Image (cartoon, grey):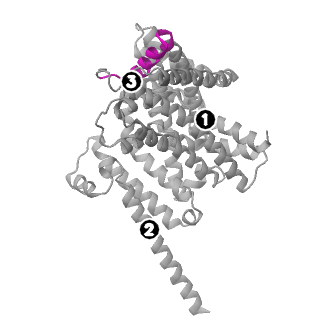
């Protein structure tokens, strides 16, 4: 095997493991159940935002020396810091970390120990997390190396058996907007936000292997394709299994309960126990990593004023409270937050994929601030704030009913800022010519 091939396969598998979050596995089956016969469209949408966006985020950061600060700093230094803080809060104590604990409780603890309350489970979970976070150990890294392959094997068995021996028939659920619904559902993985923060790790890994210049982007692209294919197969397979439950009378079933039911129907009671334990352990290693990364981040961004240990404890305490809400409520809380962060992240990523655009400060600032302003206003109803004028205005915007009302204003802002910057450039050139 050639060195290049080996390198992009290794990095591709590392990317796969990085984005293969156990907490993300509860979304595809539930989405498949809602999509029914349109699960293929749903799979495409979910993969585009759940896998494609993280890949583009890493490419964009790679073009900026693997640094999110360099990329967001084109707007302003303060914006870069505030944006990074907001993202770390989202993938940390406000959403992602509590979700790992809630997923562990609903998939692992509750089925085997029903007498244990959610609050007690959260306290024990984060107390154990702190044991590893406050005293870093290689144990978690070693466990993680075995857990990802184990979880992947279990899921592969469930998916393959579900394909060969369907657990139910796929019916038409009359879903009206399968693509836009699945695109927004893909936000829930939060992998695009995580990719912006952790892209430095991938870029450093590529550079350490001796690659320079354009070769870094080429190798990262090939590695990204490996990760995309792997994740698309897993998410697509789980969505198909979820679609097989569309004909079942499941009532108001939760996302975690649906995944457990699918596991039980394909592999029996032992199947649900095995996947519950595997996902629980995978969630644990993820939360340890996120708490460690978050504690370090706030230590660095505050220049040591917020010490690592204090940060870890505060993150854990906040996560205990939010974790008791349960997976479905955490997902509902995350909707307005991600509806604000994702448009900004997407705009930043896409602009930085094009050199001519990313070098134009007027274009960068105007586009990003437009995406931020519109998404903030568009998210007010999700926060219980209803303003008639804004509701009427957004009702006239293309794609607004699908949750993408920010797209058209951002594109218009980008085009106008390009024209303005070009006019300014032409005027300054004319002035120089006249002076000479």
Q: Work out whether mark 2 precedes mark 1 in sequence or the reverse, and give the earlier one.
A: 1
At label 2, counting other C-alpha atoms closer than 10 Å, the crowd grade (few under 14, some 14-19, many 20 or more) is some
> Label 3: which residue?
326
- Residue 378 spot, x, y in % from top left: 32, 50
Up-down: is 284 above or below 202?
Answer: above
Residue occupying image coordinates x 41% and y 24%: 321
Camera-side residue of 142 and 231: 231
Residue 256 within the segment the image draws in magenta: yes
Task: Report the side of 262 relative to 378 (left or right).
Answer: right
Up-down: is 184 above or below 307?
Answer: below
Instruction: Look at the magenta stretch and give its main secondary structure.
Output: helix
Task: Report the side of 378 relative to 387 (left or right).
Answer: right
Residue 212 within the segment the image draws in magenta: no
Q: Are marks 2 and 1 in contact (CB under 8 Å)?
A: no
Q: CA distance from mark 3 to mark 2?
A: 43 Å
* Residue 16: mark: 1
Farthest left residue in view: 388
Q: CA distance from mark 2 to mark 1?
A: 36 Å
At label 1, counting other C-alpha atoms closer than 10 Å, the crowd grade (few under 14, some 14-19, many 20 or more) is many
């Amino acid at each position: 095997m050639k060195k290049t091939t080996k390198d992009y396969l290794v990095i591709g598998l590392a990317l796969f493991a990085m984005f293969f979050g156990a907490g993300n596995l509860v979304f595809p089956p539930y989405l498949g159940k809602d999509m029914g016969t349109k699960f293929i469209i749903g799979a495409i949408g979910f993969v585009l935002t759940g896998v494609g966006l993280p890949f583009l985020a890493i490419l964009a950061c790679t073009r900026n020396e693997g640094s999110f600060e360099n990329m967001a700093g084109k707007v302003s230094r303060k914006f870069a810091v505030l944006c990074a803080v907001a993202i770390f809060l989202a993938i940390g104590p406000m959403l992602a970390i509590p979700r790992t604990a809630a997923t562990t409780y609903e998939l692992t603890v509750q089925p085997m120990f029903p007498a244990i309350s959610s609050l007690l489970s959260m306290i024990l979970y984060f107390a154990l997390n702190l044991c590893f976070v406050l005293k870093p150990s290689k144990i978690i890294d070693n466990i993680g190396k075995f857990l990802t392959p184990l979880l992947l094997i279990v899921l592969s068995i469930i998916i393959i058996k579900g394909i060969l021996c369907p657990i139910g028939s796929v019916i038409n659920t009359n879903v009206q907007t399968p693509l836009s619904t699945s695109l927004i559902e893909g936000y829930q993985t939060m992998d695009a936000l995580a990719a912006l923060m952790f892209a430095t790790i991938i870029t450093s890994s590529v550079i350490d292997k001796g690659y320079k210049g354009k070769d870094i982007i080429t190798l990262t692209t090939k590695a990204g394709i490996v990760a995309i294919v792997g994740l698309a197969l897993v998410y697509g397979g789980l969505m198909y299994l979820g679609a097989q439950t569309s004909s079942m009378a499941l009532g108001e079933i939760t996302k975690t309960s649906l995944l457990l039911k699918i596991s039980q129907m394909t592999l029996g009671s032992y199947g649900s126990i095995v996947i519950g334990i595997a996902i629980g352990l995978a969630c644990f290693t993820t939360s340890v990593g996120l708490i460690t990364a978050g504690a370090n981040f706030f230590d660095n961004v505050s220049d040591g004023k917020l010490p690592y240990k204090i940060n870890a404890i505060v993150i854990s305490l906040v996560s205990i409270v939010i974790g008791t809400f349960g997976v479905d409520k955490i997902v509902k809380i995350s909707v307005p937050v991600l509806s604000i962060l994702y448009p900004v992240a997407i705009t930043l990523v896409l602009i930085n994929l094009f050199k001519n655009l990313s070098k134009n400060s007027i274009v960068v600032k105007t586009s990003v601030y437009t995406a931020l302003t519109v998404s903030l206003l568009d998210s007010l109803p999700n926060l219980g704030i209803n303003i008639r004028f804004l509701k009427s205005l957004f009702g006239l915007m293309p794609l607004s009913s699908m949750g993408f009302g920010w797209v058209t204003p951002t594109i218009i802002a980008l085009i106008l800022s390009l024209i303005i910057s070009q006019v300014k450039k032409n005027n300054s050139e004319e002035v120089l010519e006249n002076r000479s």
